[in-house]
Amino acid sequence: MRSTVAGGIRGLLAVACVSVAAMAARATTAAEAAAPETVAKPGAVVRWAGDAIAFCGRGGETWPPLAGSCWFPIDLLEPEGAVVVHRSVGGAREEASIRVSEYPYPVQRLTIEDSSKVELSSENLARVRSEQARVRPLWSLAGPALFELPLSAPLADLGQAGSFGSRRFFNDQPRSPHSGADYPAAEGTPVYSIAPGRVVLTGDLFFSGNSVFIDHGDGLISMYFHLSSLLVEGGQEVARRDPIGAVGQTGRTTGPHLHMGIRWKGARVDPSLLLGPPSAVPELPIR
Ligand SMILES: [Zn+2]
């Protein structure tokens, strides 16, 4: 893969959202000031452990705890500032604050030899839009959690994850930030489901190539991109560690690797956080 990293460049998003952060700071009340607080990067997941939690929530949305804790996924493009979350314990409402840091990920410049994957024809643009319309409803799937944390590795030999969150330039043109983790692997390496679930979409998509999307309940969707072959089809139930396909380089890619993406309650989060020990996940202090 040809890539250069120019680290430390603050994203435009973080700059644009200063006013949002300032508003959130002004809205902080004395009660909230005493509430537990932690700092998290965009794309992180924050755990708030406790006893006898009835439900967890953010804004008007609520959901049951998982393994005794509330888990708050923070979207990769969550603006810098305070996110107030809550939970219900013994009939009492408790609040906490997650301070989302400025966008911390570096710029990455990639060269794609097939320029039709960078400068889209009107036909390809229409294809991408129709694929996005098929994928988007998956982010609001809900149902009981079928998984446990940590999730199991999608490769037998899982190397270091690369480039989650990087701000990407393809052939010097700015594109969306990288919302998954890239794991180096040779073409043909078996890829496994990270948890039990149901395959909700498969196919050859314009950017992600041969792709598998699996619904694991609790709004958690795993994605496996650029595969050389698929072993599952839509509607199929899979168990943890079931083979679902093989590593490849289909779609827009600079070489064979596994792109692993996770959306949890719609938020793009860093898969490596959920594949490792739960102790690696940022925590709100227990009170
Ligand atoms: Zn990728």
Image (tube, helix red, strand yellow):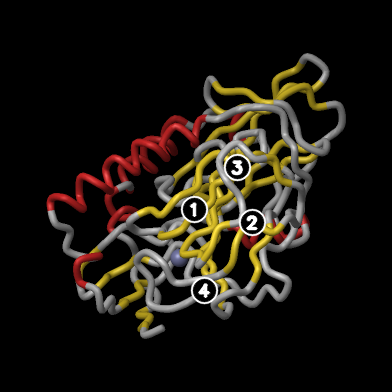
Asked if disc 3 and disc 2 are in contact, CB closer than 8 Å, the reply is: yes
Closer to the camera: disc 4 or disc 1? 4
Q: Is mark 4 within 8 Å of ligand 1?
A: yes
Q: Nearer the viewer, residue 229 or 254?
A: 229
Residue 92 position in % (x across, y down): 75, 17
Q: Viewer-proximal residue, 94 or 128?
A: 128
Q: Residue at x 31, y 53 (%)?
A: 13
Q: Which residue matches tag 3?
A: 199
- Sequence-wise, the earlier of marks 1 and 3 is 1
Give the residue at x 53% y 63%: 229
Q: Is residue 98 shown to the viewer in this render?
A: no
Would you say 257 lies left or right of 274 here? Answer: left
Q: Which is more N-terminal, label 1 or label 4?
A: 1
Image position of 90 with respect to 31: above or below? above
Judged from the image, the secondary structure of the residue bearing numbered disc 1 is: loop
Q: Is residue 186 above or below residue 199?
A: below
Q: According to the image, label 1 marks what residue?
A: 42
Label 1 within 8 A of ligand 1 by Cβ: no
Alpha carbon distance from label 4 to label 1: 24 Å
For the N terminus, the image quarter is bottom left
In the image, farthest residue toward the left = 122
Q: Residue 165 appears at what percent x and percent y?
A: 44, 62
Report which residue position mark 2 lands on.
Answer: 244
Q: Secondary structure at mark 4?
A: strand
Q: Helix, strand, or loop for circle 3? A: strand
Q: Quadrant of the C terminus?
A: top right
Q: CA distance from mark 1 to mark 3?
A: 27 Å
Which amino acid does the dot numbered 4 rest on?
Answer: His
User: Which x, y percent locates residue 252?
Assistant: 34, 66
